[in-house]
Amino acid sequence: MSRVTLKNLQKTYEGANTPTLPGVDLTIEHGEFMVFVGPSGCGKTTLMRMIAGLEDISGGELYIGDQLANDVPPAKRGVAMVFQSYALYPHLSVFENMAFGLRLAKRSVHEINDRVKWAADVLQINHLLDRKPKALSGGQRQRVAIGRAIVRQPKVFLFDEPLSNLDASLRVQMRVELSKLHRELKTTMIYVTHDQVEAMTLGDRICVFNHGHIEQIGTPLELYDRPRNLFVASFLGSPKMNLLSCTVDTLNTKGVTLRLPDDTRFKVPLDGQSLRVGQQVTLGLRPEHIHDSTNGEGVKVRVDLLEHVGDALFAYVQMPGMTEFLIVKLAPEAHHHRIGDTIRIELNTRCCHLFDRDGRALPPLPGSAWHVDDGKTTVAA
């Protein structure tokens, strides 16, 4: 079994006033593709390097399978790491780069040849085995780096932002290749990235880090549809979630009535028992849950920018009395809109999120089943 278990794992650098990782508790199941995501400096790469044995553990326990690995040398932990920089030997062929670790481990020539051939077959780089790294494209070099890891047949694969040096089209291609590789090998994989699109498309589960703490763990859809707090809500999603400052107007058992700065009021079906009237809160709505109205109802807004993304069209609009922009995903039939146009929008308040002043998400009403649908709710003034 290649489960990875972290029990209050801590990291404090010498001379530092505060710990980089104050204590992480996490279990990564056998065969799971776990993605660590978060902004630069949040501790995700440090944690991966601790699992690999490249950073000392200041406190807590690390288990790989059933073995306590705190003091196990990196070469004996059963892990293999793929780095951001490829780290290929320029004077060695692709074959020799992939075979290098096996030669150090004193594997037989027959075993080395078999493992390199198997890895080359999996990664479809058989035709590159005689080339030097300088004769390879970026995507091919990354495949070689991955091949060098998989020939070791480790218990756990560690990927440290392996696609960040590739251009956009190659990143998409390599995401597909990594996903296929995971399905084929059925091995535990831990992947570090600051790119939330990579996290959403690759991970079985995502672990969102912020300042050394885990903010939330869940499947991509769980984190997208039900973020636990304002940080997760604003970090995941492209385009990002719309966040609007509102005031609590009234509270009852059917939800919370909010008031915008222009005195527009509307109700959201969320449990507001922890709030009070007059309190400032933050409303969150994904762009796909704000609709351009086709029936003449809704709030008038001005289109300040149009962004074409393939067959999708996003409008950046401003509501009266507000400084924040709203990002609206327009329907295909609305592609005739131009910058400067005035349109009407409707908010699907059944799919909204509400965060208190501490950034915590309000839960759904007791007994209700929060879900995303295509219903529209007109904002009433």
Image (tube, rainbow, N blue to C red):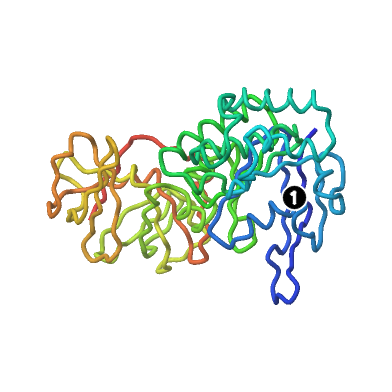
Horizontal and vertical percent for residue 8? Answer: 77, 57
The three-letter code of the residue at mark 1 reads: Ile
Q: Secondary structure at mark 1?
A: helix
Horizontal and vertical percent for residue 110? Answer: 79, 23
Quarter holding residue 43: bottom right
Pick the residue in front: 196 or 101.
Answer: 101
The vertical placement of 320 against 181, above or below, is below
Count of numbered labels shown in the rendering: 1
Disc 1: CA contacts within 10 A as few (<14), some (14-19) or many (>=20) = many
Pick the residue in front: 190 or 133.
Answer: 133
Pick the residue in front: 88 or 252.
Answer: 88
Horizontal and vertical percent for residue 133? Answer: 57, 40
From the viewer's perspective, is 211 left or right of 75?
A: left
Horizontal and vertical percent for residue 294? Answer: 17, 39
Quarter holding residue 65: top right
From the viewer's perspective, is 284 left or right of 83?
A: left
Image quarter of the N terminus: top right
Residue at left offset 75%, top offset 35%: 154
Which residue is the site of mark 1? 51
Residue at left offset 63%, top offset 48%: 87
From the viewer's perspective, is 354 left or right of 95?
A: left
Residue at left offset 55%, top offset 49%: 193
Quarter holding residue 325: bottom left
